[in-house]
Amino acid sequence: MLTRKEMKKYLTLLLVACLTGSQALCQQHANVGVFAGTAFYLGDINPSRLFYRPSLSLGALYRYNINQRYAIRANAYYVALSGSDADFPEIEHPDRPFSPANFSTSLLDVALQVEFNFLPYEPNQKTWDYTPYIATGFAGGMIANSDTDATNFLSIPLGIGVKTTFTKRLSGGLEWSFRKTFSDRIDGYSNYSGVWSVIHNNDWYSILGVFITYKFFNFAGDCPAYE
């Protein structure tokens, strides 16, 4: 499994890259932040139970606000997931050659997303401005299962949330997203039933948490080259 030290290193490198990129571009509408929350898995072992075995999720993000309605965001999250057939005694697995199945894994999730604000939103300009929003894009990750080698995968993130501005520099919010992966090895087990399913043949996972973002530049005053 990816160790806590390795995940901390990856997230620290991302945060440093975001800060360096912000300084280089000197963007008056850019924010850098951190994320903390919980995650859970959906797949062959857990077909539909929400918030099953909630585990830790941590991350860093960079957001560029294009206008009042749209923003582009890059983020990287550490996610811990686990599951066991023993938690679902009512579900039989006659086609699975080894049962009960169980797994515990960590993964690094990296995504590039577009956010759409339902309300006009002026980040870092109006105190207590807020809006609900939706987000989607493309994501990829690296899995480290307890019984398999690290595996790369692609996914489509689908999220909904709300964000608000606390001060001219500080903002935050809450987001709940699902990752539709194109891998059936998140849990280390493939669907042995032979029945293809858009929902359950490829594993999913969900991330729920809060984020805090900060603007390091005070518009043109902090960036002489801005004009």
Image (cartoon, helix red, strand yellow):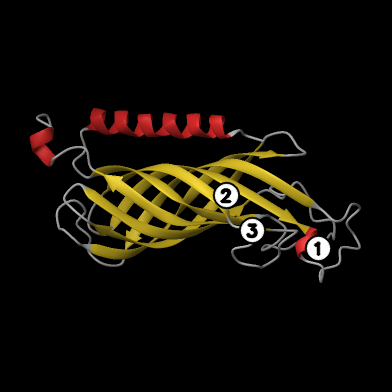
Which residue does the image show at 79% across and 59% down from the upper left? 85
Gap between marks 1 and 2 measured at Cα: 21 Å
Judged left or right of residue 83, residue 135 is: left
Which labelled disc corresponds to residue 45?
Answer: none
Look at the numbered discs 1 and 2 and tell me whether their residues touch, using CB distance below 8 Å.
no
At mark 1, the secondary structure is: loop
Q: Residue 136 appears at what percent x and percent y? A: 45, 55
Which mark is nearer the camera, 2 or 3? 3
At mark 2, the secondary structure is: strand
Q: Residue 127 appears at what percent x and percent y? A: 16, 58
Look at the numbered discs 3 and 1 and tell me whether their residues touch, using CB distance below 8 Å.
no
Residue for badge 3: 53
Residue for badge 2: 155
Judged left or right of residue 145, residue 173 is: left
Q: Residue 88 appears at what percent x and percent y? A: 77, 66
Which mark is nearer the camera, 3 or 1? 3
Which residue does the image show at 87% across and 63% down from the upper left? 93
Three-letter amino acid code at the position of disc 3: Arg
Look at the numbered discs 2 and 3 and tell me whether their residues touch, using CB distance below 8 Å.
no
Three-letter amino acid code at the position of disc 1: Val
Circle 2 Cα neighbour tier, 10 Å, few/some/many (<14 / 14–19 / ≥20): many
At mark 3, the secondary structure is: loop
Three-letter amino acid code at the position of disc 2: Ser
Mark 2 or mark 3: which comes first in sequence? 3
Which residue does the image show at 28% across and 65% down from the upper left? 131
Judged left or right of residue 177, residue 104 is: right
Circle 1 Cα neighbour tier, 10 Å, few/some/many (<14 / 14–19 / ≥20): few
Residue for badge 1: 195
Q: Is residue 226 visible?
A: no
